[in-house]
Structure formats: C-alpha cells, structure tokens
Image (cartoon, rainbow, N blue to C red):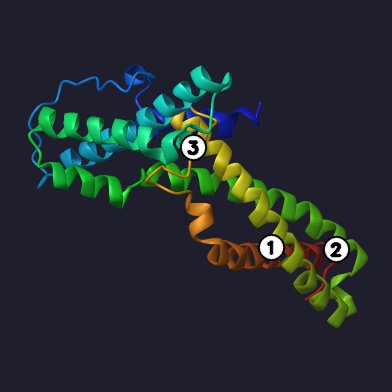
Amino acid sequence: MTGLIPVSVLLLLCVVGCVDRARINTRCEWSPDAVALLDLRDRQQERHLDNDVELATELAVRYADSMHEQLFGYEGHGGLIEGGRLRDRCMATLLSAISTAHKVPLNRVIEGRTRGRRPLAWDASAMLLFAVFYVCVSWVIARRISRRFPVDEGWPALAAPVIASFGISAAGSQLGGLWGNVAEMIRVGNDHLSGYRASSNPWEEHLVEIYVAGVILFLVTVGLRYQLDRRRFGCV
C-alpha cells in the first residue's frame, strides 16, 4: 500500500508539471489554447509561455521521430534526418505559431526556448521522493554497519560509515540519475529523452552537489542509528 504513495504523488504533480497530453500530435501542428494575448510581466502568464515552448519542443521531437519511422521502419532518432534540419524546421514553425497566437515577439519566444525553464515543483518532488528511498536504504545499511561495528568500538565505528558513504553515495547518484530519467519520461509522456530538449535533467546538472548530499545524508542516517543503539543499550 505504501508503495503507491510515490506513484500517487507523481500522478498528482502531472496536473501542474506534465506536458499537455491533449495537444500532442506527430504532425508538427500547433493546437491553440484558450489564452490569447499574454502579458509577460505577469509571472503566471510567462510560465504559460514557457509551457507552450516546452510543448513545441515535444511536438518537434515526436514529429521527427515519426518521420524516421516512416523512412526506416522504427521510431526514434528523428534528429538524424537531414542532420536535424527537419526537426529544426518543425520547431521554427511551431515557435512562430506560438508568437502569432499569443501576440508575443518571436525573439521572446525563442528566448524562452533557449532558457528552458522547468517546473520547479516537479523537480523538487521527484528528488524528494528519491531522497526518501535513499534514506530507507541507508537505514538498512546503517543497521548492518552498527551490528558489525558497535558504537562502543571507537574508531572502527567512526571509520566504517565514512568509508561506506563514498560508495553508497556514488551508487545512489547513478540510481538517482536513472530515476530522474524515468520521472522525466512520465512528465513528457515520451520514452525518447532527446538531447534536443531545451530543459535538461537536473540530476545531470548537479552531480557533484548530489554526490556530496548523498554522503552527508548517509552519515546522518548512520549517526541516528548509532544514537538509537546508544539509548537502547543504556550508553551515555
């Protein structure tokens, strides 16, 4: 039952973080929404433009992939067609359509494509869910370490967690990257995470920070485990 919680959270976040599935197609066609003129001085309306640009990127990727399937019999690698020019022409058409639909200068739309803002709530929640999983695994490992190196053994009890933290965090960073990719596939509704997307995976942008955070988080978890053992056995 508890395993459904992370999935439920991700599905809930799709309401605000996922690409609009109703406007997805593989024909490089822009489907206008109800909003016409956008006032980019308003952060919410600026975010609306960011969402449209992200949708255009997804449409360009899907269009190129579908054309690749027609030409070669399997979907994917659409960016290889004409050296990416087919996809780029589709993207230019879509960005122009956004500019016309919302009465926004084309250069401002292109700027949004370059900036590639991501939904902060989605990224933060995806990372938080993985952090919870990481702590749970760390707790199991910490229990094994505390049994092998009891708190009253002195230096071995201090050195073992520190040494283990480097490997555990390295493994966690790699697994976290995979989790980030899976979460991104869920968000965009596409298992082809093309490098053409304006927004990149935050896991790949902050590998060092994530690794350091993993080391600290593991050591804190082991420290809590040792503190629990001290209380259980009546140590001061």
Instruction: Give the x, y percent position of residue 91.
Output: 30, 34
Kindly report the distance in space between the C-alpha atoms of the residues bearing marks 1 and 3. Answer: 43 Å
Residue type at mark 1 is Phe
Relative horizontal placement of residue 28, taking residue 125 as reference (left or right): left
- Callout 2: 10 Å neighbours few (<14), some, many (20+)? some
Residue name at image x 56 percent, y 30 percent: 7
Instruction: Give the x, y percent position of residue 2.
Output: 65, 31
- Callout 1: 10 Å neighbours few (<14), some, many (20+)? many
Classify the position of the C terminus by image quarter. bottom right
Kindly report the distance in space between the C-alpha atoms of the residues bearing marks 3 and 2. Answer: 50 Å
SS state under label 2: helix
Residue type at mark 2 is Ile
Query: On the image, which quarter does residue 188 sit in?
Result: top left
> Circle 3 sits on which residue?
80
> Circle 1 sits on which residue?
218
Residue name at image x 72 percent, y 56 percent: 171
> Circle 2 sits on which residue?
145
